[in-house]
Image (cartoon, rainbow, N blue to C red):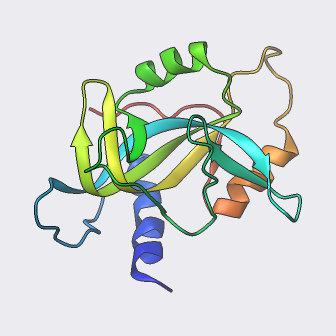
């Protein structure tokens, strides 16, 4: 098992407030080094060549590969893996777009902080949840369960409570 995957598995409980988050990043030269920062983002869903649903970034249309952290280049202007600092910011973002899945993500490596969020070198989902249903009480779509299982993360019934 790779070091990052082991660290990600150890972090899942920490992202949900159950235990402290372990450091998992190696030193970098000229950037702010952090790891992990828990932040929030939204995705669309897309099918891969095998017709399996995968997470796809809302703007760049990059597909997130299960059990492989996605890498960005935050040192370049407007590049990096974007995520929002708060669930309130995520809810506002969701009003302007049509996300099919929300989640908490771990960010690490070179991370640039902005007013509402971050741009990071590395990211991987910690937990996923579906957008609010227009029909409360309607059962969870089993395809969303499959997406969460594909990434090895829990599918939550809704967003986790923010920890300050």
Q: Position of residue 32 (x, y in %)?
A: 15, 53
Residue 15 percent coordinates (x, y) = 41, 49
Is 30 on the left-hand or right-hand side of 95?
left
Q: Is residue 19 visible?
A: no
Residue at horizontal 79 percent and vertical 14 percent from the top: 134
Q: Position of residue 138 (x, y in %)?
A: 86, 25
Q: Residue furthest front?
A: 77
Which of these two is toward me, 145 or 28?
Answer: 28
Name the residue at 30% across, 40% down. Answer: 77
Residue 132, quarter of picture: top right
Which sits in the foreground, 41 or 6? 41
> Residue 89 occupies which quadrant of the picture?
top left
Q: Is residue 116 shown above or below 111?
A: above
The quarter of the displayed image where residue 100 is located: top right
Residue 121, x across and y down, in percent? 34, 56
Question: Which residue of the protein is positioned furthest toward the bottom in this rendering?
Answer: 1
Residue 103 in view: yes
| 149 horizontally vs 124: left or right | right
| Quadrant, the C terminus | top left
Q: Nearer the viewer, residue 90 or 46?
A: 46
> Number of callouts in the render?
0
* Residue for point 81% across, 22% down: 137
- Between 68 and 19, the residue placed more toward the observer is 68
The residue drawn where x is 49% and y is 64% is 69
């Amino acid at each position: 098992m790779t070091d990052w995957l082991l660290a990600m598995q150890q972090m899942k409980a920490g992202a949900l407030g159950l235990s402290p988050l372990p450091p998992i990043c190696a030193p970098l030269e000229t950037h702010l080094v952090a790891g992990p920062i828990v932040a929030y983002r939204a995705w669309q869903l897309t099918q891969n060549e095998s017709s399996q649903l995968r997470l796809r970034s809302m703007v760049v249309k990059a597909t997130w590969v299960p059990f492989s952290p996605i890498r960005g280049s935050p040192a370049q202007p407007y590049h990096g893996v974007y995520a929002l600092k708060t669930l309130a910011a995520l809810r506002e973002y969701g009003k302007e777009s049509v996300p099919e899945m929300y989640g908490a993500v771990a960010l690490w490596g070179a991370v640039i902080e902005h007013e509402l969020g971050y741009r990071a070198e590395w990211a991987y989902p910690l937990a996923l949840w579906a957008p609010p249903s227009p029909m409360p009480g309607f059962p969870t779509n089993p395809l969303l369960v499959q997406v969460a299982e594909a990434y090895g993360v829990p599918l939550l019934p809704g967003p986790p409570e923010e920890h300050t």
